[in-house]
């Protein structure tokens, strides 16, 4: 038990942390911390002892605003980026900035999140130095109901950016999961602030979580079967700074064409969406019904056909669609 807790703390740090501090945080002895570190090393974790304490080595260069900006020279969003070492959630941080009036294209990026989350309150594992945890503020003028395709379009834009930067083929599991090799590579969480009565959108924070550098065996046990990373799929550690720049540029292109090229975004999303044509379980109010996914419409709603032949459009907020036998199928 102590081993897992020590690992959780080390995964959140980008600077060395003393054995005494870890011991205090966990109410255990320094000897127990040391014993856990030894066990973790035997498990293959690269933990070094620095003058200021223990450090779990990270596989790639740190995130850097300068390095990201050098890949987006002249782009209007390049100076709207904040890079943090540790944050509760980049989405929560970006929502705070948006409420204070931050402009469109303001982006928050962190090396680690303590409370990274996805849809339906699920947590998003966010170890330091291994992923991209990025949130971007958008301020579309359209009314909230005209923006139902946004999350799908963001998933498509991010998938295209990852492919362009790494060569990895990225699929999408309806509605917001990024998938590679039939495992989850990442996900999108869009959060909107709006006056629904006045049909006015205040802002949308789009959050992007991507597993980049984890080796296949490095995920926590509960994710081991269903999660993957760019490095695990390609055998190459991606340049996270270049990839963040590519994603930001892709998002600004999406912002410019969200309404004018809506059908194109949806068509490209649909051809990437591995849910279509598959048997799925539609979960609603604790009950599961088997169905076949037929296709999606301009609002990114999913058409399903139940075994009794009835059909229904499902919107993302309503239900969750799972494969019949596992994460994908
Ligand atoms: C999902 O899988 O349901 C979506 C996961 C979204 C995770 C990202 S990481 C950056 C941003 N901050 C969060 O707390 N969530 C999103």
Image (spheres, grey):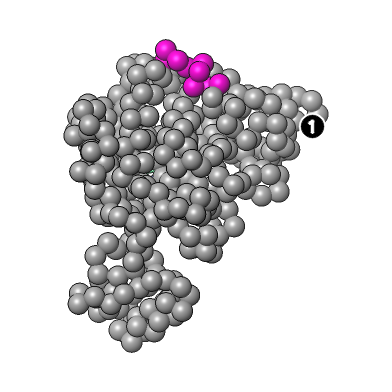
| Figure check: 144 above or below 50 | above
Does the rendering let one see residue 251? Answer: yes
Q: Indicate yes or no whether the magenta region holds residue 265.
A: yes
Magenta residues (range): 259-267
Residue plotted at (44% across, 30% down) = 157
Secondary structure under badge 1? loop
- Quadrant of the image for the C terminus? top right
| Figure check: 39 above or below 103 | below
Q: Residue furthest top?
A: 260
Please name the residue that numbered disc 1 is placed on.
Answer: 307
Q: Indicate yes or no whether the magenta region holds residue 287.
A: no
Q: Is residue 286 left or right of residue 212?
A: right
Quarter-of-image position of residue 20: bottom left
- Of 18 and 256, nearer the camera is 256
Q: Residue 41 location, x and y as percent?
A: 42, 77
Q: Residue 174 location, x and y as percent?
A: 57, 34
Q: Is residue 96 left or right of residue 229?
A: left
Residue plotted at (59% across, 47% down) = 181
| Figure check: 21 above or below 197 | below
Label 1: how many Cα within 10 Å (few below 14, some 14–19, many 20+): few
The secondary structure making up most of the magenta span is helix
Does the rendering let one see residue 125? Answer: no
Q: Residue 272 location, x and y as percent?
A: 57, 31
Q: Is residue 52 left or right of residue 112?
A: left
């Amino acid at each position: 038990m102590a081993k897992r807790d020590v690992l959780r703390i080390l995964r959140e740090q980008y600077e060395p942390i003393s054995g005494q501090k870890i011991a205090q945080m966990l109410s255990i002895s320094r000897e127990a911390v040391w014993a856990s570190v030894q066990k973790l090393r035997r498990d293959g974790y690269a933990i070094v002892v620095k003058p200021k304490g223990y450090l779990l080595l990270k596989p790639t260069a740190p995130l850097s605003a300068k390095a990201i900006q050098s890949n987006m020279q002249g782009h209007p969003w390049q100076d709207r980026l904040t890079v943090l070492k540790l944050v509760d959630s980049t989405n929560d941080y970006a929502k705070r900035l948006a409420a204070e009036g931050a402009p469109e294209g303001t982006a928050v990026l962190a090396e680690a999140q303590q409370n990274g989350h996805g849809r339906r309150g699920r947590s998003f594992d966010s170890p330091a130095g291994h992923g991209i945890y990025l949130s971007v503020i958008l301020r579309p003028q359209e009314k909230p109901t005209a923006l139902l395709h946004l999350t799908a379009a963001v998933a498509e834009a991010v998938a295209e950016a990852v492919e362009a930067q790494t060569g990895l083929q990225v699929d999408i599991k309806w509605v917001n999961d990024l998938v590679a090799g039939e495992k989850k590579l990442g996900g999108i969480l869009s959060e909107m602030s709006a006056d629904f009565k006045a049909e006015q959108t205040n802002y949308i924070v789009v959050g992007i979580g991507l597993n980049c550098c984890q080796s296949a065996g490095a995920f926590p046990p509960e994710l081991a079967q269903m999660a993957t990373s760019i490095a695990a799929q390609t055998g190459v550690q991606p340049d996270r700074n270049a990839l963040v720049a590519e994603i930001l540029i892709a998002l600004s292109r999406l912002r410019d064409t969200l309404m004018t090229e809506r059908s194109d975004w949806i068509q490209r999303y649909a051809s990437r969406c591995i849910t279509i044509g598959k048997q799925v379980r539609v979960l609603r109010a604790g009950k599961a019904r088997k169905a076949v996914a037929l296709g999606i419409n301009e609002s990114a709603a999913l058409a399903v056909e139940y075994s009794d032949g009835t059909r229904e459009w499902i919107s993302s907020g309503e239900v969750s669609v799972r494969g019949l036998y596992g994460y994908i199928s």
